[in-house]
Image (tube, helix red, strand yellow):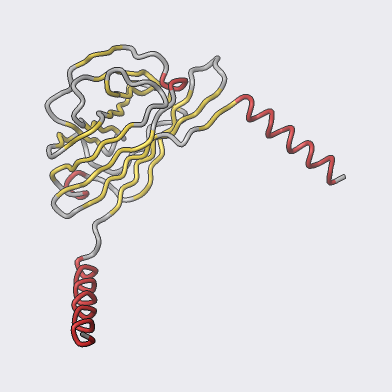
Amino acid sequence: MKTTVSMIVFLLFAFIGGESRSYAGLILNLHDNFTTVEYTVSGHLDGIVLGTPTSTGVTPPANGSVSASTGELLILGDSASYQVHSVTLFGSIATFGTGSLQTTTGTSSGDLFGLFVNGGSAEIWLPSGYQGGNVLSATGEWNGSLASLGLTTGTYLTSIRTPAGFPIAVDTIAINISEAPEPSGFVVLGLSTLFMLKRRKRKA
């Protein structure tokens, strides 16, 4: 009996695995640093989910942007041009705060990345020439804080999928937002370091 049940479970998973795929996707980390919000972008998006770009070689705007209440953002990086992909949402774009659309200023390097609402679907902006599966990477900081940009701490997942009629493949964009350490933590760390240095000096 156990063997029969195990075989049914195996065949079920094999069938599901043959019809759909899931990817680790792209990860954006936003970290409050009191007067700035530091960010990193890492990971990749799959070409099957992205499809063919609807436009290429577009010149980036002068500044990035963020709209936490609609789940949209643009990280400029230092890409000279970008391409647009109209993608199908698996659910809806995850909002990550209460802030309205704001221009972001600050340092930025690496690959451009944008996520925008487009009716019931979404637009993803990527560096011109991007091929699905290639690694995306960017670092930088926005002037301001989580509070001033209206960002709420937490992890927010937006999933995109292949259009209807195609075998299901799903990719995920994860936005992780974290607070700066409490000032008291820095004090404790400083005192601990000072104590250790004094102990070493006495032993010497």
Outermost residue on the front side: it is 204
How many marks overall?
A: 0
Quick one: 142 or 127, which is closer to the camera? 127
Measuring 25% from the left and 20% from the top, which residue is drawn there?
82
Q: Position of residue 62 (x, y in %)?
A: 12, 26
Q: Does 167 appear above or below 34?
A: above
Measuring 36% from the left and 18% from the top, which residue is drawn there?
86
Quadrant holding the N terminus? top right
Q: Quadrant of residue 143?
A: top left
Quadrant holding the C terminus? bottom left
Q: Position of residue 35 (x, y in %)?
A: 13, 52
Measuring 29% from the left and 48% from the top, which residue is drawn there?
152
Q: Quadrant of residue 182?
A: bottom left
Measuring 32% from the left and 40% from the top, which residue is drawn there?
28
Q: Quadrant of residue 80?
A: top left
**Is 24 positioned to the left or the right of 198 in the image?**
right
Quick one: 138 or 75, which is closer to the camera? 138
Q: Position of residue 139 (x, y in %)?
A: 23, 40
Outermost residue on the right side: it is 1
Q: Position of residue 54 (x, y in %)?
A: 33, 12
